[in-house]
Image: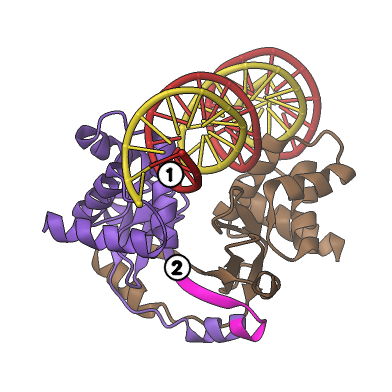
Chain colours: A purple, B brown, C red, D yellow
DNA sequence: GTTTTTGCAAATGATTTGCATGGAT
DNA sequence: ATCCATGCAAATCATTTGCAAAAAC
């Protein structure tokens, strides 16, 4: 539902005092349609087809904005480029040491003990990132 | 025990078919003495005092070697520079969104479900990295 | 009209690479 | 003597920054 998606983003932006721009709408649509983590460069490439002239700095600024609004997560999976994930529900990632591929792991991870320890130091954690590393099926075969 | 540390590294290197060099010995000592995660640049700075002329490319190559030998862990905590951690026992990290400080969290995290899901795909995970993000005590105050 | 956002170009900064020399085996 | 490891310089590449023009409010 393209319209609904646009409206949801518009409302979120306005509520936070930000402006609604075509760049933000397109980037949010692309992120949602991808449905999976992608690098800024990949997101920019797809989005540029719909909005020629879109620049990388804008993509980075917008994705950072989305993260601050809770609309996306930035995931550092060890590769050179960071990934941006439209899934905001807690889930783990698996990154292959050999080929670098990153995949979702739909499994619960109990980090409550770690959160408790963090809070005991006076910190306020708002997010948990769980990353498993190793060899993926394809790389194990070769 | 400096001698013991050196011998442990020497044995590990030889077993894996690598050579024992003064750079590797110094870097391993520094890493152990620090006892906490540090950036390559920081490790290089400290190590250079003991081994003038030590180059950054060597530091990176050596830390990567240590990781492949299971002597250190590379941790991507979101900041621009990766961290290298001499602690190889499982533990979580907390990274402050504001100031970027990374601290250890000594708490157990049960990731067995995620590991099981990963193995079900044919992958072979060998490591789990748990990163909590939020505001540290100092940054919450200001 | 005013303020935010964008695009461009350039800067930054971590990490890697190519290659000749030095060092470990 | 052989081959691996190092240092240097330069390349690479993701990400950020400064600033003038364009767009949203």
Task: Tell me what residue is drawn at x 33 percent, y 63 percent.
Answer: A12
Choose between B69 and A125: the one closer to the eye.
A125
Q: Quadrant of residue B4?
A: bottom right
Q: Quadrant of residue C18?
A: top right
Determine whether, in the image, residue C2 is placed left or right of residue A22.
right
In percent of width and height, residue A37 lies at 31, 54
Indicate yes or no whether the magenta region holds residue A18. Answer: no
Residue B124 seen in this snapshot: no
Determine whether, in the image, residue A126 is placed left or right of residue A6.
right
Task: Tell me what residue is drawn at x 38 percent, y 48 percent.
Answer: A100
Choose between A128 and A53: the one closer to the eye.
A53
Real-space CA distance between mark 1 and mark 2, rounded to the nearest whole angstrom? 20 Å
**Region rendered in magenta:** A119-130
Q: Would you name the residue on which mark 1 appears? A: A60
Say above or below: A119 vs C16. Answer: below
Nearer to us of marks 1 and 2 is 1
Say above or below: A103 vs B103. Answer: above
Say above or below: C11 vs A60. Answer: above
Indicate yes or no whether the magenta region holds residue A122. Answer: yes
Task: Tell me what residue is drawn at x 11 percent, y 59 percent.
Answer: A1
Q: Secondary structure at mark 1?
A: helix
Residue B42 seen in this snapshot: yes
Determine whether, in the image, residue A142 is placed left or right of residue B67.
left
Figure quadrant of the C terminus of chain B: bottom right
Q: Would you name the residue on which mark 2 appears? A: A129
In percent of width and height, residue B17 lies at 60, 45
């Amino acid at each position: 539902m393209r319209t609904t998606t646009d409206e949801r983003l518009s409302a979120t932006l306005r509520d936070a005092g930000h402006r609604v721009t075509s760049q933000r709408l397109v980037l949010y649509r692309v992120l949602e349609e991808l449905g999976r983590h992608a690098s800024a460069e990949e997101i920019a490439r797809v989005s540029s087809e719909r909005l020629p002239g879109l620049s990388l700095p804008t993509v980075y600024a917008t994705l950072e904005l989305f993260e601050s609004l809770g609309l996306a997560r930035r995931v550092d999976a060890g590769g050179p480029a960071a990934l941006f994930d439209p899934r905001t529900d807690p889930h783990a990632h698996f990154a292959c040491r050999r080929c670098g591929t990153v995949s979702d792991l739909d499994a619960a991870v109990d980090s409550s003990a770690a959160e408790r320890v963090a809070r005991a130091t006076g910190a306020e954690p708002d997010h948990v990132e769980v990353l498993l590393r190793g060899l993926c099926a394809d790389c194990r075969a070769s």
